[in-house]
Image (cartoon, grey):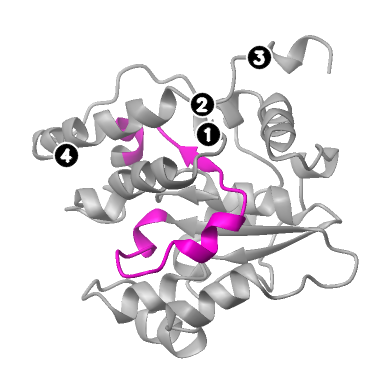
Amino acid sequence: MWSGPRTVSTALMRSFGNRADTVVVDEPLYAYYLAHTEVDHPARDEVIATMPSDWRQVLDQLVYAPLPDGKSVYYQKHMTHHLLAEVDRGPLAGLRHAFLIRDPRRLLASYARVRSAPTLADLGLAQQAEIFQAFGGPVIDAADILRDPHSALEALCDALGIGFDPAMLSWSPGPRPTDGVWARYWYDGVWRSTGFGPYRETGPVELPAGLEPLAAACEPYYAELAAHRLGPWPLASSGR
């Protein structure tokens, strides 16, 4: 699952992690990304110290390592900007790929609360479009998940050929052993959650003037991916 930040990606990992047939991994290329860039993120040194920072080793685990007994789905939560250009895409071709997107204006409004001067590379939309062009796969919009989690997840699972599990709709609160070591800086909301939060129609998003050029730069990449997104579907609230 390829996404950028602030896209309900951790809640979606929780959802898949609540399936009995699934094992999840949280941003496995993060240490590699931090070790090979000058980006300063919370827990940077701890992430590098506790995860493999050689992309070859990471890909071996993602592609070739056997699943635990009783598990048939390996859900890999990736940030698109962690897949730097030097990583060989070849081994990834045998995996099924999916893409989690979010309207860039809403993404930027959320991300700017955490980092005041984000760049296009921080948001991962250009990388997400590149990965989509390379592999294809179902595209799901974060807003559609929040509007109707049942229908959205059912459509996503059908597109991936794994079958929907109602256990994906709720989970117990708190941390998980599978959460990255950075979770204490970023996952407060997910740790408190027991399911997907409500969707709120808030109208047009006002951004600081300094972020408007970045929003405009993001829009073509989002539009390219959104043209392939799953849906629409009847609202589940009428009978489910």
Q: Earlier in the sequence, mark 4 or mark 2?
A: 4
Residue type for callout 2:
Arg
* Residue depicted at 54% across the width and 56% down the height: 93
Q: Residues within 10 Å of mark 4 (few under 14, many from 20)?
A: some
Residue highlighted by disc 3: 233
Bounds of the magenta segment: 80-107
Q: Residues within 10 Å of mark 3 (few under 14, many from 20)?
A: few
In this view, the mark in front (1 or 3): 1
Q: Is residue 209 left or right of residue 102?
A: left
Q: CA distance from mark 4 to mark 2?
A: 23 Å
Q: Secondary structure at mark 3?
A: loop
Q: Earlier in the sequence, mark 1 or mark 3?
A: 1
| Residue 27: % across, % down | 51, 65
Q: CA distance from mark 4 to mark 3?
A: 31 Å
| Residue 194: % across, % down | 71, 47
Q: Secondary structure at mark 2?
A: loop
Residue type for callout 1:
Val
Residue type for callout 4:
Leu
Residue highlighted by disc 1: 139
Q: Secondary structure at mark 1?
A: strand
User: Foreground: 10 or 187?
Assistant: 10
In this view, the mark in front (3 or 2): 2
